[in-house]
Amino acid sequence: MKIGLLSVALSGLVAAQNFYDRNPQIMELTPKTFKRAVYGTNHTTLVEFYAPWCGHCQKLKPTMERAARALDGLVQVAAVNCHVEANQQLCMKHGVEGYPTLAVFHPAAGKAGGRARHSREPYQGPRKLRPMVDFSLARMRNHVRRLDGDKLRVLFEDGGSRPLAVLASTRDRVAPLYKSMAIDWLGAVDFSFVAAAKLPKDTPVPDRPGLRSCAEHLAGNLDRSALLLFDPKSDECHVYSGKLTKPAVAEFLSKVAKPQEGPLSKRERFLETLKGSKRTRRSDDDDHDEL
């Protein structure tokens, strides 16, 4: 009899255990942490509402872990264990009727503040890695100003009052990594993008020496992407030459302004507490390597 009761107790314990407590890229959320983690950000969040005893959830778990790895530093990934009694009202609030339920939360259009109410969009596509990742990336807010040659010339003539990051890319699209950096420094650094093929043939000659230095660096044909950072306070142009990883670029940008989110921010330290002590140092191969 005692063995039977012990078996039932242990099975109940296993069923209540969180799936992702040991995953360094996924936050296990509760009603106390959900609001700050999901709504208190300008980043997009992919959330799985699950129950550990659910066979479909168990089958999805490896895909969620791979998706979290692919989205690390770009889109937040979180989970809520709806089997835990304290979480059940939160799951009901978000319309969870079956497991697993996937949803993407993202800031409403036109809202720049982290406290703005987010839109909740259910994910009803294939429960496969690529569709889930693509769906999440497509919901990232884009705070990068896309320029052509004429707009770049006007930008250099003006300069603005905030630090300015300009990426001249050999690619024609704004990479998710660059979008994520713009979100991290939202309101502190203005981010712009220009395809190298659309750089002006004649170099603008701004009055400010720092802007002139940036403009001259972009003159001619670029055979590789170039990231420049203009600091209006010191009137200096900084040219990035390091690895294209988020931590490295964050260190570069922090020369002129502190981020609101992402690496080096106070918020990042809060998010790490949700992941416990499971965060480990990643190899360079694990980081996103394109701007």
Image: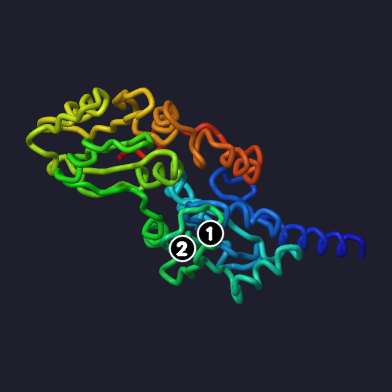
Where residue 92 appears, x then y in whole percent?
A: 66, 73
Please state the total of marks drawn on the protein image. 2
What is the basis of the colouring in this image? rainbow
Secondary element at tag 2: loop
Q: Nearer the viewer, residue 218 or 213?
A: 213
- Residue 86: x %, y % from top left: 75, 63
Q: Nearer the viewer, residue 280 or 210?
A: 210
Above or below for 263 versus 105: above
Nearer-N-terminus badge (2/1): 2
In this rendering, the answer to whether 284 lies above or below 172 is above
Q: Quadrant of residue 169?
A: top left
Q: Which residue is mark 2?
A: 108
Residues marked 2 and 1 touching at CB (< 8 Å): yes
- Report the side of 268 relative to 191 (left or right): right
Q: Which residue is mark 1?
A: 116
Extreme left residue here?
201
Alpha carbon separation for disc pair 2 and 1: 7 Å
Q: Is residue 133 left or right of residue 32?
A: left
